[in-house]
Image (cartoon, grey):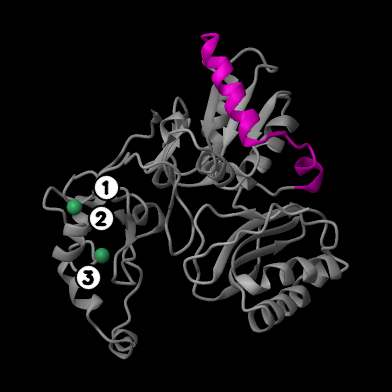
């Protein structure tokens, strides 16, 4: 049974994520991809991002309200997916979060190591939000400091995180696993609990399975991730200060985040004022991911402030095609505004500086 289907939406779309690990026939993947691309986009008017591979499916979608049940019916009518897709994980805030539908054949998560179903089947323990919260509060009450790890990237936890979490300062899941292994090795007891959370649960399912396959017996993850915890917090009547998670949940879609609590944990990358609204530089070949306040957005015309970016942001589509430029940053620089913004609030390659990898504690 799915969670109750959400009723309200800002614009008639509901946003949902789900993932599942099961064997898909490699030879069938292109056909399945084409079928889903056609039937979901044309028939069900779904937009979003789907990854298919031999180990399963990972999907983030916005669905017109009238078709939410249609998607579940489609899945259950298809022999490959019937009975294999667990509950839909509905978003905290509902509106259309993607422009189009992209179904791709590629790994579910870039783990940096080939994942096998035998590893993925060593699932960690999944704690529902209420149980997760109870265990963490109890541990604190007894004066324990449980190992609580934020499995997301640096830019994600900048705008929101669990209190007391270790937030490894990384840009990718692969780097995250290296830090996590070090953190776990530092403790002598392989049976001591390890608590992990991420956006919607898939990264923790994978990381938890890897750790279990390496001999850690007591790996606990937040079921449904921060999305599920956020809904848990927002559905109860007590004041939001009782949430163990503060701030926003970063999302990999146009919204770039949804609110769990009203706490603002971050600062505008351009002026330093309190702000937690992510944006991408309006110059597509720059596309820098950074936090920008309203005032700076107007001042720099929705760009990172670079004069080329301001100029290109005003160009028409045709002009941009004529004057095509290669990407301005590689991935690691594009998501690290702390490395490229100068004191003048403008991102420039010459501002690039080395930032030591470190663990930030919330
Ligand atoms: Zn600002
Ligand atoms: Zn820019």
Q: Position of residue 208 (x, y in %)?
A: 67, 35
> Is the residue at mark 1 in contact range of ligand 1, meaning its CB lies under 8 Å from it?
yes
- Crowd around label 3: few <14 · some 14–19 · many ≥20 (10 Å): many
What residue do we see at 18% from left, 63% from top? 305
- Mark number for residue 275? 1
- The residue lying toward the viewer, choosing from 305 and 201, is 201
Q: Position of residue 1 (x, y in %)?
A: 78, 53
**Cβ–Cβ below 8 Å for labels 2 and 1?**
yes
Sequence-wise first label, 2 or 3: 2
Distance, label 2 to label 1, CA atoms, is: 7 Å
Of tags 2 and 1, the one toward the viewer is: 1
- Crowd around label 1: few <14 · some 14–19 · many ≥20 (10 Å): some
39 versus 346 height, above or below: below
Q: Position of residue 328 (x, y in %)?
A: 31, 65
Residue at the top extreme? 142
> Is the residue at mark 2 in contact range of ligand 1, meaning its CB lies under 8 Å from it?
yes
Q: Is residue 132 magenta?
A: yes
- Residue range in magenta is 116-144
Sequence-wise first label, 2 or 1: 1
């Amino acid at each position: 049974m799915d969670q109750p289907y959400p009723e309200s939406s800002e614009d008639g779309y509901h946003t949902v994520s789900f993932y599942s690990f099961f064997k898909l026939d490699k030879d069938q993947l292109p056909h399945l991809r084409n079928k889903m691309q056609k039937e979901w986009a044309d028939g069900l008017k779904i937009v979003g991002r789907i990854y298919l591979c031999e180990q399963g499916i990972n999907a983030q979608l916005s669905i017109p309200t009238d078709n939410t049940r249609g998607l579940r019916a489609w899945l259950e009518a298809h022999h490959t997916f019937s009975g294999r897709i667990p509950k839909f994980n509905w978003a905290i805030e509902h509106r259309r979060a993607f422009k189009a539908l992209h179904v791709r054949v590629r790994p579910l998560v870039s783990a940096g190591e080939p994942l096998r179903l035998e590893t993925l089947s060593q699932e960690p323990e999944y704690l529902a939000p209420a149980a997760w919260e109870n265990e963490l509060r109890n541990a604190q009450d007894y004066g324990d400091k449980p190992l609580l790890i934020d499995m997301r990237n640096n830019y994600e936890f900048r705008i929101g995180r669990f209190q007391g979490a270790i937030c490894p300062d990384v840009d990718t899941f692969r780097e995250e696993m290296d830090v996590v292994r070090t953190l776990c090795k530092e403790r002598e007891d392989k049976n001591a609990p390890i608590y992990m959370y991420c956006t919607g649960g898939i990264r923790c399912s994978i990381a938890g399975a890897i750790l279990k396959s390496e001999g850690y017996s007591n790996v606990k993850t937040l079921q449904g991730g921060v999305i599920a915890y956020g809904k848990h917090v927002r559905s109860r009547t007590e004041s939001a200060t009782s949430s163990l998670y503060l701030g926003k949940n970063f999302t990999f879609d146009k919204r770039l985040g949804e609110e769990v609590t009203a706490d603002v944990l971050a600062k505008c990358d351009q002026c330093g004022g309190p702000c937690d609204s992510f944006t991408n530089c309006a110059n597509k070949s720059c596309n820098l991911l950074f936090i920008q306040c309203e005032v700076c957005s107007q001042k720099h015309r929705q760009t990172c402030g670079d004069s080329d970016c301001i100029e290109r942001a005003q160009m028409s589509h045709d002009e941009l095609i004529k004057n095509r430029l290669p990407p301005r940053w590689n991935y690691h620089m594009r998501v690290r505004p702390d490395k490229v913004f100068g004191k003048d609030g403008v991102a420039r390659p010459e501002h690039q500086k080395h930032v030591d990898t470190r663990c930030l504690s919330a």
